[in-house]
Amino acid sequence: MRNTLATQPIFELSRTGRRAAVFPASDVSERPLEALLGKGALTESLPELPEVTEPDVIRHFVNLSTLNMSVDTHFYPLGSCTMKYNPKRHERLARLEGVGDVHPYQCDEDAQGMLAMLFELQEMLAEIAGLPCVSLQPAAGAQGEFTALLVAAAYFRDRGEKRTRVIFPSSAHGTNPASAALAGFETVQMKPSKTGLVDLDELRSLVDGRTAVFMITNPNTLGLFERRIGEIAEVVHAAGGLVYIDGANMNAILGVTRPGDFGGDMMHYNVHKTFTGPHGAGGPGAGPIAVRDFLGDYLPGPIVSRKGSPPAAAGGTACFSLTTPSKSIGRMRSHFGNVGILLRGYFYLRTLGAEGIRSVTENAVLNANYLKAKLADVLPAPHGETCMHEFVGTAAAAKRRGVTAMDLAKRLLDYGFHAPTVYFPLDVPEAVMIEPTETESKETLDAFAETVARILNEPAELVKSAPRTTTVCRPDEVKAARQLVLRWTPNAVESVAGATADAGR
Ligand SMILES: *Cc1c(COP(=O)(O)O)cnc(C)c1O
């Protein structure tokens, strides 16, 4: 049922004098605040707060909290984003008093426990990457890319090499060319290839003495493992360039293979994807990077270093400290990065251990292949027999009878599924990119597959007018982005709607 009350700003519920709690009359004589605090401590006018009852407040926020889909409420197969379930245990651990209340300005000696955890996280990320030097600073994958490219630029500058180009496949995530441009490089995009994998001949023709970095996601954004990654890295290295591995798809290779082992020189992690940091809604992320030893001196600081053995064994002497690498590019962010998210990743890794990490990947790949096979008739995947942790199907057949990938995505909302990623990567027509993750059961995957098949059999007009059960139904996308309607009126929601049907609510 559509919840109109929750779309009303709380200020519009305000009635002068309404209160959640009313205190009894005071039995001591009143004195003006000014006399107690001094005039300087008071504002000239009272803050404009909504005046509402307790039920008003509770209903407002509880209803608001139900408007969005989340991994805690629905299956969320958003390709490329790894929306896996975030275990609540790690939320609890990250909030423990001795963890959540540590202040970033506490001196190293007083924060040994926190530094120990961050140090161990650096070590674990180095091990999983097969790359020894780690910086926890970047706040997201995109900032990790940017940071690593600045590291590469500093490295080449130091060597007196003028390398100006960054090359990437056509299926690359948009952040790759954006980061390269922001870091001052010229961007070179490869042509879409028939196999969905990097065309080595084309790569050879593009790589030369101007090449600074080749950026590649492995498995790539089609969910395919670049089997010739070793040869790809050789081509880049032979010309003196560096290989950057976009680690957003690490969920597919954890504990099975390592970027450092297949030729990567630098990479980022998305802790909020691979290691269950909650994400979405513009909240904090974490994008630590790992690099080869010869790039370690350029990393942003501070980095947690260890001297000797941990405090208990060393009779209370602090052994973890914050250091800045000798040729550091400087800070990328305040303090050590988004520690709250980094810690959730730390607890996740400590909970699972080495074997658990590998089983994450095995189950993520199994779930994706199961779903890919289940959907083969309705959303065939144009590339590859076997996928990794995600796959890209095409709704091109449905489009011929008027139902687009976008229509399907919208209609899925009516059935209680978050929409998959659509129209990415760009080389697949009517792309539907699905990533089930390892945290979903067979029953959920079956229900999803049956629902997709059912929707593609529904009359086109019905699918095209979806969603019908959400608060805002089918806004005209351009109009909704440019003419924001923030004030609630019974007609406001409909005023931005295009072909919204009112039936069924
Ligand atoms: C998500 C993603 C990024 C960007 O990461 P953010 O953490 O969102 O900044 C880069 N590349 C790929 C392939 C991704 O899926």
Image (cartoon, grey):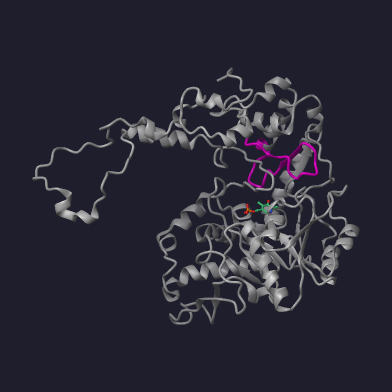
Q: Is residue 400 left or right of residue 105?
A: right
Question: Residue 377 in the image: x percent, y percent?
Answer: 81, 32
By secondary structure, the bulk of the magenta-drawn segment is best described as loop
**Vertical relation: 420 (above or below) 227:** above
Residue 474 visible to an observer of this rendering: yes
| Rendered-image quadrant of the C terminus | top right
Q: Is residue 218 left or right of residue 132?
A: right
**Is residue 421 in the magenta section?**
yes
**Is residue 233 in the magenta section?**
no
Q: Residue at x 73, y 22 (%)?
A: 460
Numbered circles on residues, count: 0
Question: Residue 380 in the image: x percent, y percent?
Answer: 81, 37
Q: Nearer the viewer, residue 368 or 398?
A: 398
Query: For the view shown, which residue lies furthest in the right direction?
Result: 201
Residue 250 visible to an observer of this rendering: no
**Vertical relation: 130 (above or below) 277:** below
Q: Which residues are magenta?
A: 417-444
Q: Nearer the viewer, residue 490 or 479?
A: 479
Q: Quadrant of residue 266?
A: bottom right
Q: Quadrant of residue 233?
A: bottom right
Q: Residue at x 11, y 45 (%)?
A: 30
Question: Residue 158 in the image: x percent, y percent?
Answer: 70, 78
Question: Residue 62 in the image: x percent, y percent?
Answer: 43, 36
**Vertical relation: 153 (above or below) 488:** below
